[in-house]
Amino acid sequence: MKLPASTTAANTLIPLDRFSPLVLMGLVTLRHESSDIYIILFASSLGNHVPSSSTKEQRMYAITGITGKVGGAVARTLLAAGRSVRAVARDREKVSGWAGRGCDIALADMQDAATLAAAFAGMEGVFVLLPPVFDPAPGFPESDAVIAALRSALLAARPGKVVCLSTIGAQATQENLLTQLQRMERALGDLPMPVTFLRPGWFMENAMWDVPSARDQGVVMSFLQPLDKAIPMVATADVGRVAAELLQQDGEGPRVVELEGPERVAPKDIAAAFDRVLGRPVHVEVVPRGTWEGLFRSQGMSHPEPRMRMLDGFNEGWIAFEGPADSVHKGHIRLEAVLRDVVQASA
């Protein structure tokens, strides 16, 4: 699960357009065509597919969000296993590097179900995630539109299987930012092909927003509280690796796979890891609950309630894994390794 601005930094304005589509909880609007129009558009959209000379569609996997951390990790894992990959993106320039690795390129706008269907057609498997909108309008109209279009595209294309990036707490009954993923699971759960919903914990990479304050002031400001409460966290590289493994597995659907890192992490653990990585004392402080709405509105949010309720869910414990503890998959990458990477990237 990835958040805008900071999971912890309380006084930095982060432009929302800086976010890559890692996860899960915000969406853009998709146009939803009638079936009669859809057939015409699907036929005309085939020109957006740019195959490589080594295309093997019967064993090819289409990856959305390939320019982001999770989607990129999915693609790298598949390529390392000798699989063929189709990069699905709106901008050809942004995926030129993937073309250089031998990937097919399918140009598709996440607001256009027809081009998505063309990109998914003939695939052994498809990995889907949703572009983030962290400030959704009441009732989540943005996510409802994109979910409807994804469902239409997958029904038209009929790939062999689907792995969908969801989130921890998708089953929560209290409405919050992650409710959008619950709606997606319900909409895609009855598709006529095996569908796996991958529910990762809180993304360790959210700590990237804390690097400046940890490095310069020796403090991490935390919305997660109490400060010694450990929650499931996971590295995006582990999420991508597991998603790629699920794409290559046979099985029935729908099914849910929950994923966390090697150990659970509390805010105080993040500060201690920064202490070791930066070589300076770092401590953690609470961002008081009463200041959240004003803070989020000052950062440009119009509807902060869903985000606030999501944070409440983690802090109060009703956003959690659904299955028993022994059913949760474990990643390999530890927090300190992720922090070393994000600190180096910010240098």
Image (cartoon, rainbow, N blue to C red):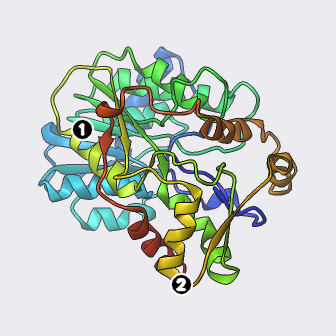
Spatial CA span between label 2 and label 1:
35 Å
Give the side of residue 54 with respect to residue 306, left or right. left
Q: Residue at x 15, y 29 (%)?
A: 250
Q: Name the residue beneath numbered marker 2.
A: 347
Give the side of residue 300 with respect to residue 347, left or right. right
Give the side of residue 163 with respect to residue 89, left or right. left
| Horizontal and vertical percent position of residue 182 | 53, 25
Helix, strand or loop status at disc 1:
helix
Query: Residue 303 appears in which quarter of the rendering?
Result: top right
Query: Crowding near pointer 1: few (<14 within 10 Å), some, many (20+)?
Result: many
Q: How many labels, in total?
A: 2
Q: Name the residue beneath numbered marker 1.
A: 246
| Horizontal and vertical percent position of residue 94 | 44, 63
- Nearest the eye: 152 or 191: 191
- Dot 2 or dot 1: first in sequence order is 1
Q: Amino acid at mark 1?
A: Leu
| Horizontal and vertical percent position of residue 32 | 56, 24
Q: Residue at x 29, y 56 (%)?
A: 332
| Horizontal and vertical percent position of residue 164 | 39, 34
